[in-house]
Amino acid sequence: MKVNSPQPEAVPLPKAPALFGLSRSTLYRLAAEGKVRLLKVGRATLVDAASVRAFLAAAPTVDVRQRRRRAA
């Protein structure tokens, strides 16, 4: 049986792109726009995971339709 490990509240910026699927520059842009939070702890820049999850949850979904085949 798998036990759900707790999700981190803040993620170091270098690890955030792999975790959230957003580039480092996109995270900085979203922070500048006030859509996600970045935190400074000493020299480390951390990404507030809850703010990124909220941003992704509010993002529009994509309607994927099956492609029609052309008649030959």
Image (spheres, rainbow, N blue to C red):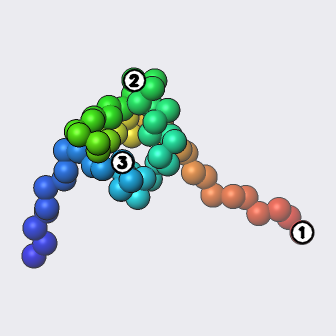
Residue 54 in which image quadrant: top left
Label 3 and label 2: CA atoms lie apart by: 16 Å
Tell me which residue sits at (45%, 32%) in the image.
30
Q: Is residue 6 left or right of residue 53?
A: left
- First in residue order: circle 3 vs circle 2: 3
Q: Is residue 25 left or right of residue 57?
A: right
How packed mark 1 is, by other alpha carbons closer than 10 Å (few <14, some 14-19, many 20 or more), is few
Residue 55 in which image quadrant: top left
Label 3 belongs to which residue? 13
Q: Position of residue 11 (x, y in %)?
A: 27, 49
User: Residues at badges 3 and 1 in contact (C-beta under 8 Å)?
Assistant: no
Q: Is residue 18 left or right of residue 67?
A: left
Label 2 belongs to which residue? 34
- First in residue order: circle 2 vs circle 1: 2
> Quadrant of the image for the N terminus?
bottom left
- Quick one: which residue is furthest to the right in this view? 72
Of badges 3 and 2, the one in the foreground is 3
Secondary structure type for disc 1: loop
Type of amino acid at the residue the image marks with label 1: Ala
Residue 34 vs residue 67, the one in the foreground: 34
> Quadrant of the image for the C terminus?
bottom right
Label 1 belongs to which residue? 72
Secondary structure type for disc 3: loop
Q: How many marks?
A: 3
How packed mark 3 is, by other alpha carbons closer than 10 Å (few <14, some 14-19, many 20 or more), is some
Q: Is residue 20 above or below residue 53?
A: below
Type of amino acid at the residue the image marks with label 2: Gly
Secondary structure type for disc 2: loop
Tell me which residue sits at (13%, 55%) in the image.
6
